[in-house]
Amino acid sequence: MRQDIGTSFQTKEVVDLYLYRPPYPQRIYDLIIDQSPSMDRILDLGCGHGKIARPMSQHFSSVTAVDPSANMITLGKSLEFGTEPNLEWVKSYAETAPLTGQYDTVVAALSIHWMNHEVLFAKLAKHLKTNHLFAVIEGDGAHKPPWESDWQAFLAKWIPKLTGKPFHTSTDWPFWNKYLDYVEVKQTHKVVSEPFYQSIEDFILCQHSRDTFAISKLGNDLGNFDKELWELLSPFANANGELEFQSLTKLTTVTV
């Protein structure tokens, strides 16, 4: 895949909205820690603002967090555990990151889908211990919320409008599974979070942290997009104007 795909994640406009994304369930972090062969070295590819790397700095002796976005790294350093002495931030694409030595554990979230897998896995093969853990983490959106059917209709309208491509659900879009051609799947864990509460305003801002719905990509359609989404969600808000939902996060462990 081309490395220029998903460049909106390098813009401050999108990065600043990342804090509106729901957190991963604690169980996801526990699974990585429990299944890692050692608490020595962990590599986080496409780390963003360190959603995984920063907490892992409290458990691993050495954490290397790689991301091509200077804005993401700046945000990560400003957050909890972002300046730990055992956490090294590296501004680079995963495929060209200056890696040294070998890692016990490698993690990647949705960023794995944007990478050139042929190049990436050939590179990683030289930097992984024999009994390594490679964990892919996916999912921080609302899981089967009460507005699910309306949301799918909303996506089916707006995604083709903005991208010129057909709408696919996350389960029927081959793009999401291309990396599996280069690895051997060991286990898959699906974890549903505790209830999460978010205002409608913040939920909409969260959508603008996603590449397809970046504010700059919406352009003159921004007002209509936000208005339609507000009207869709309003009937489901509680007395405090908040939406209640859970997220489903999938952790797939593989061997490279």
Image (cartoon, rainbow, N blue to C red):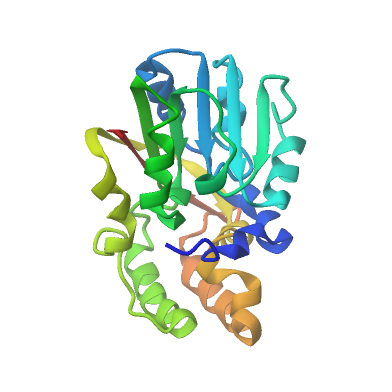
Q: Position of residue 52 (x, y in %)?
A: 54, 33
At a point 39% along the width and 68% down the height, the residue shown is: 151
Left or right placement of residue 186 versus residue 73 in this view: left
Above or below residue 60? Residue 134 is below
Left or right placement of residue 148 versus residue 52 in this view: left
Above or below residue 88? Residue 208 is below
Which quarter of the picture shows residue 177? bottom left
Which quarter of the picture shows residue 256? top left
At a point 30% along the width and 70% down the height, the residue shown is: 168
Q: Position of residue 63 (x, y in %)?
A: 59, 25
Which quarter of the picture shows residue 131? top left
Which quadrant does the N terminus fall into?
bottom left
At a point 56% along the width and 33% down the height, the residue shown is: 99
Left or right placement of residue 99 versus residue 250 in this view: right
* Residue 122 visible in rendering: yes
At a point 58% along the width and 14% down the height, the residue shown is: 61
Above or below residue 180? Residue 192 is above
Q: Position of residue 179 (x, y in %)?
A: 32, 50
* Residue 194 visible in rendering: no
Depth order, front residue of 199/192: 192
Above or below residue 161? Residue 125 is above
